[in-house]
Amino acid sequence: MGQSVELIPLVCTHCSTPLPANPEEVAWVCAQCGQGLLLDEQKGLAPLDVYYSAQIPPNTRGKPYWVAQGEVTVQRQTYDSGRRGDQEAQQFWSQPRQFIIPAYDCTLKAFTKTGVDWLRQPPALQPGSPAAFEPVTLHLDDVKAAAEFIVVAVEAGRSDQMKEVSFSLDLSTPALWILPG
């Protein structure tokens, strides 16, 4: 026997307004009351805090990003005998880093470039007024794997002929931020 399919009504948990949604979307903000909502496979819709950047120009759509603090410990092996890359890695990861992970649909190349660039130079996160934004398609449950991918991209981008890398990543609970597009 097949498993039964359970339909989850997409209505705001705060005001019961229907949420227009596409199949790939995983988070919304209610147009009526402003409540943020995240699709949770066990609980259905769960409340979600959504933060908007003050840097979004008026009348423009922002883009959603998961933002979390991460502490990374890296162990590397290289093909060259120099230790410069290892020293750079240890210095870079010696302090907690702010991971800003695209939560919208984009190419792998754009995802990697944005994630790495903003890891190296994060934007100021100053809260502002609500704004329209692109659909949220990266689920909260996938943020740690996405952050791990960005760590590997940073390490692979070093010019020291990396042979192998292993690391641990301790990531805080991500928050959804809407940033300029």
Image: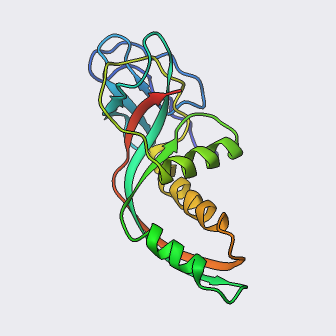
Quadrant in which residue 105 is drawn: top right
Which residue is at the far bottom?
81
Q: Residue at x 54, y 57 (%)?
A: 145
Structure colour scheme: rainbow
Provide residue 104's location: percent of width, then percent of height.
56, 34
Provide residue 174's location: percent of width, then percent of height.
37, 47
Question: Position of 5 compared to 31: left or right?
Answer: right
- Tell me: residue 13, above or below residue 122: above
The number of callouts visible is: 0
Provide residue 69's location: percent of width, then percent of height.
36, 55
- Tell me: residue 87, above or below residue 136: below
Q: Nearer the viewer, residue 16 or 179?
A: 179
Quadrant in which residue 129 is drawn: top left
Q: Residue at x 45, y 72 (%)?
A: 91
Q: Nearer the viewer, residue 11 or 103?
A: 103
Q: Residue at x 50, y 45 (%)?
A: 101
- Tell me: residue 174, above or below residue 177: below
Question: Position of 19 compared to 69: left or right?
Answer: right
Question: Position of 70 compared to 60: left or right?
Answer: left
Provide residue 146's location: percent of width, then percent of height.
55, 53
- In what quadrant of the picture does the C terminus appear? top right
